[in-house]
Amino acid sequence: MRIPEETIDRIRQSADIIDVISDYVSLKKRGQNWIACCPFHNEKTPSFNVSPSRQIYKCFGCGKAGDPVRFVMDIENIGYPEALRHLAKKYGIEVAEEQLTPDELIKQNERESLFIVLNFAKDYYHSHLLTSEEGQGIGLSYFRERGFLDNTVQAFELGYSSDQWDALLQEAGRRGYRPELLEKAGLVLSKEGGKTYDRFRGRVIFPIHNVSGRVIAFGARILKTDKNQPKYLNSPETEVYHKSQVLYGIFQAKNAIRQEDICYLTEGYTDVISLHQAGIKNVVASSGTSLTIEQIRLISRFTQNVTILYDGDAAGIKAALRGLDMVLEEGLNVSVATFPDGDDPDSYVRKVGAEAFRNYLSQHSNDFITFKTDILLKDAGDNPFKRAEIISEVIQSISKIPDPIKRQVFFQKTARQLQVDEQTLISESNRMLLNQQKQQIKQQEKAGPSNRVNQQSSVSAPPDLTELLHEFPVESPPTASKTADPLPSKNRSPLFYQEEECIRLLINYGAHELEPDISVCHYMLSELGTMEFVTPIFNKMLNEIREGFLSSEIRTADYFLRHLNQDFQHQAISLVTVRHQLSENWQKHEIYVPTEVDKLADAAFGNILRLKKLVAEQQMKEIKQLISQTNDPVESDRLMLEYMHYKKVDIEIGRLLGTVIS
């Protein structure tokens, strides 16, 4: 369905880039911009940059860039209309669209269709819990026995599935939802012979939300005693649900995690719900699965501090410890807390209350290394062989910590705890780290070297700007040399980087005046004349700027950032985003550092010179090849004169640039 243009404009105007991205990532202010570790690829040092003034984001690591709508599209993996609807819902903007009919639903993107039918199921289970006799008598009674209040049931959208074979299936059919779609969403099962029935029957329902609050799956607990049925039943993997990438309660907890700067990690649904109801809202659950790297990275979007809450089951704790080194490896600060035998977070907070629960955590939480060492030492006793194994295992865990300062602190503390020499631990760790580096080098050698080209140059002092080198006209390089935009950096020529720099100067500083009535745009376009760029995207942007200038309009970054052409948007974001900013201490200590605007004349003049020099070099190469192929003396003489013209241009530009020309 089409969304009216005026509604799209309202959504775009309402969507604040900081507000939108903060729903998924914890941003930190740096100068005028905000930074974070990128949510689109794994990194430990922030390279994700957000500009509130331009309402754009850019990752210098993976290259992802865009505006609020593009961010939602990328992070949610949804289309443009779905992203607009998502933002409209966030900002309370009504989107005037007709209700989808079953036929229209078939045409709808399948991923979005899954979200729609999962949301229907959530509403159905929730309504059945609150309004049906069976739901109230069984499901709601169970939740109230657990101490869950009505607002808690509402916050987590808890539900109940009827103890019938196809209650959901029948209701879905009446609403026009196809059985095939329900099966893809994991809501129904099909037997041989064509019989289809509900997956969840006679169970209380725990909807599982993604970070943005959309229902992607369900967990279901059986209430009657049946040895042939599992206590908990979860949705299968679907296109929208990957268990290893999801944390139960993350939608309800993300703001509290960011504000408290710590995440409590539990094992079960009821742990999360009970703590949330007690006012401890910065809590999520791994839903009974072993913690995965994707779940750790999801937490790291909002905080670097994690406290894992275990019950008193010693065997379970030992098993879980083996998988927690990867949390350290991701750079998170990990603590562990256990509860008295027989208690878990759910039962303990209901027993002692929120304040006593918090006090208990503050007194009984230990950093992961200390906790792990204590557990292993109790097992080893005085056995020297087991103690040696423990030392090796603990060193291995410490070696996973990427921060060398943190590693040093843990070596000091662990040496005292194990009663061994600190240097022994460090030496063994260095040996482990050296082996890791050797393995990384081998992997890099197999992958091949990186041939990233990075050209940077400047002009010390430009000549008088009224002398615009008109005596050195340079035509465009031959069209035969034009290729598609070479995205891989190893394929980028020096000409690519100079064309990129030219467009960067034009869109960032086009309106700046170099002299009275001579803007950067006026000067550079005059110098370029009719030159066409080799790189297609830069040539298109150059022609857009030329068209605007002919209409007395200087088209700067804002023009391209709002352009409907996604390629223009992406390039503009890359060219306006500055990765490094000057420290505020420079200003504090009154140290003046010239800005790019201060050296704009040098930059513009130097870029034009380099462009013309590269084109001249290309032309000379082409002409030399033609000379070698001709047998006509007249044509040869003509080509030689043309060659000498470009050689003269090359020498003169080289002199202005301070380049030695042979």
Image (cartoon, helix red, strand yellow):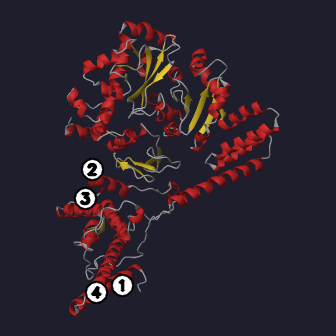
- SS at mark 3 in the image: loop
Q: Is residue 8 left or right of residue 49?
A: left
Q: Identify the residue position indicated by label 1 in the image.
A: 651
Task: Look at 39% across and 68% down and name the residue there.
Answer: 599
Q: Which residue is mark 4?
A: 627
Q: Position of residue 356 (x, y in %)?
A: 62, 20
Pick the residue in front: 558 or 110.
110
Q: Earlier in the sequence, mark 2 or mark 4?
A: 2
Residue type beneath disc 2: Arg
Q: Quadrant of the N terminus?
A: top left
List the residue tagged with mark 2. 562
Cβ–Cβ under 8 Å for marks 2 and 1: no
User: Which element type, helix, strand or loop, lies under badge 1?
Assistant: helix
Classify mark 1: residues with Cα within 10 Å, few (<14), some (14-19) or many (20+): some
Give the residue drawn at x 47%, y 28%. Answer: 249
Q: Residues within 10 Å of mark 3 (few under 14, many from 20)?
A: many
Q: Amino acid at mark 4?
A: Ile
**Residue depth check, mark 4 versus mark 1: number of the one nearer the observer:** 4
| Front-lying residue, 241 or 122 | 241
Question: How many angstroms separate mark 2 from mark 1 (CA)?
Answer: 42 Å
Q: Which residue is mark 3?
A: 555
Q: Which amino acid lies under the numbered mark 1 shown in the image of this protein?
A: Ile
Q: Which comes sooner in the sequence, label 2 or label 3?
A: 3
